[in-house]
Image: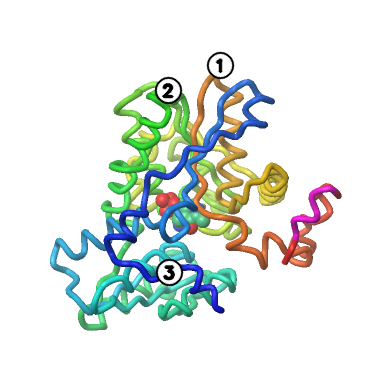
């Protein structure tokens, strides 16, 4: 049995039917403790087990409708894994299937690479270099698409079909599921489409909504937002995959208009949050832990009884060799901070 067996073969219609309409889960214990309501969208419920199904669906539809992609073509994309997984899963539902070539950062967790390859995708590792470097993964994908016939660069970073997915689905779902009672929204930004799409939708409904970016160590977004665009301090990578930026994307072109502020969490606190959530029966990936910590921070700054919503992109078990691995956490100086009674969740 390979990891690919966890994803049954379905038709395109069935796959798309399983995207969106995810549950809005209340964090009961935390909400009680702080006297505010904190919810998250359970995006691991999507067909491909992550939030990136929403993006892949809209991006592929856009490529087909614009005529840039024709049957049997190839999808080339730079991805930290989840978008690649969604493209591979959705691409294989077509007849003939779309070929998928993914350019991933060289430190991507091995489980994700194994899974992508077992689904038939080609995975190419690229070095951790600055976005203006020719070997930066996104530049590798652009070059490959240019040089290969019937191949498109999916371009999740700048193609606004990605953001539209969240403006038309995630945002309206949050509005309906809270009966319009949402005072704050928090999300990290990978491409920034979730943050941009959800916030631009919710602010049309409630202009007083407070929108905060959840940033990780090493990313430039926090300094950019909190300095109102005056500074950009990005030091590099962190343990949290999929979010945090070294350069702005097209999805975030109006970030300073949309964001009321930003929070930055250190890796250690995010991991601790994830382990505490395991103990509450939840399996929350690193970017979800970052979002929840930040949502709690925003909720505490709002009046009692306020409601703050965030997103959980995927499960922690997707990153078992890092997040659930004692040795990995030890070598990153985090293990010693995990309380004794929570250590049993490190099962890798
Ligand atoms: N969390 C994870 C694990 C991701 O892979 C991504 C997408 N890169 C995000 C969050 C952020 O989503 P977005 O690209 O819409 O900003």
Q: Secondary structure at mark 2?
A: loop
Q: Residue at x 84, y 48 (%)?
A: 341
The location of residue 224, given as percent across then percent down, is 48, 42
**Is 133 on the left-hand or right-hand side of 153?**
right
First reached walking from the N terminus: tag 3 or tag 2: 3
Q: Residue at x 54, y 73 (%)?
A: 3
The location of residue 285, given as percent across then percent down, is 59, 53
The location of residue 157, given as percent across then percent down, is 35, 57
Dot 1 corresponds to which residue?
303
User: CB of mark 2 within 8 Å of CB of mark 1?
Assistant: no
- Tell me if mark 1 has few (under 14), some (14-19) or many (20+) residues whose alpha carbon lies within 10 angstroms of its own: few
Is residue 213 positioned above or below 36 on the image? below
Q: Nearer the viewer, residue 111 or 281?
A: 281
What residue range appears in magenta? 341-346
Q: Is residue 245 visible?
A: no
The location of residue 330, given as percent across then percent down, is 79, 62
Is residue 250 positioned above or below 298 on the image? below
Q: Is mark 2 within 8 Å of ligand 1?
A: no
Q: Nearer the viewer, residue 324 or 344?
A: 344
Q: Is residue 47 magenta?
A: no
Q: Nearer the viewer, residue 275 or 3?
A: 3
Q: Cα distance, mark 3 to mark 2?
A: 37 Å
Q: Cα distance, mark 2 to mark 1?
A: 13 Å
Q: Residue at x 62, y 39 (%)?
A: 293
First reached walking from the N terminus: tag 2 or tag 1: 2
Q: Cα distance, mark 1 to mark 3?
A: 45 Å
Q: Which mark is residue 181?
A: 2
The C terminus - image quarter = bottom right
Dot 3 corresponds to which residue?
8
Q: Quadrant of residue 254?
A: top left
């Amino acid at each position: 049995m390979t990891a690919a067996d966890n994803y049954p073969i379905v038709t395109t219609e069935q796959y798309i039917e399983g995207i969106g309409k995810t549950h809005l889960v209340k964090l009961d214990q935390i909400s009680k403790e702080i006297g505010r309501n904190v919810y998250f969208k359970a995006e691991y419920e999507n067909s491909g087990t992550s939030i990136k199904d929403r993006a892949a669906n809209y991006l592929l539809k856009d490529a087909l409708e614009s005529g840039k992609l024709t049957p049997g073509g190839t999808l080339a994309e730079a991805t930290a894994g989840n978008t690649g997984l969604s493209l591979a899963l959705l691409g294989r539902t077509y007849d003939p299937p779309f070929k998928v070539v993914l350019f991933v950062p060289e430190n991507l967790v091995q489980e994700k690479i194994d899974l992508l390859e077992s689904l038939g995708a080609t995975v190419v590792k690229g070095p951790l270099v600055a976005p203006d470097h020719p070997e930066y993964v996104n530049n590798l994908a652009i070059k490959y698409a240019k040089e290969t016939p019937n191949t498109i660069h999916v371009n999740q970073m700048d193609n606004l079909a990605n953001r539209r997915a969240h403006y038309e689905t995630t945002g309206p779902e949050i509005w309906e599921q809270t009966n319009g009672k949402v005072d704050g929204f928090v999300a990290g930004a990978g491409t920034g489409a979730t943050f941009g799409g959800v916030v631009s939708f919710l602010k049309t409904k409630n202009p007083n909504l407070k929108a905060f970016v959840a940033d990780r160590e090493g990313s430039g977004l926090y300094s950019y937002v909190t300095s109102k665009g005056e500074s950009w301090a990005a030091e590099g990578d962190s343990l949290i995959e999929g979010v945090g930026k070294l350069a702005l994307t097209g999805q975030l072109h109006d970030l300073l208009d949309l964001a009321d502020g930003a929070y930055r969490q250190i890796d250690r606190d995010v991991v601790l949050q994830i382990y505490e959530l395991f103990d509450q029966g939840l399996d929350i990936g690193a970017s979800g832990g970052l979002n929840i910590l930040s949502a709690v921070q925003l909720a505490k700054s709002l009046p009692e009884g306020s409601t703050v919503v965030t997103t959980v992109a995927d499960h922690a078990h997707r990153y078992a060799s890092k997040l659930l691995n004692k040795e990995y956490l030890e070598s990153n100086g985090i293990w010693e901070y995990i309380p004794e009674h929570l250590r049993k969740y490190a099962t890798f």
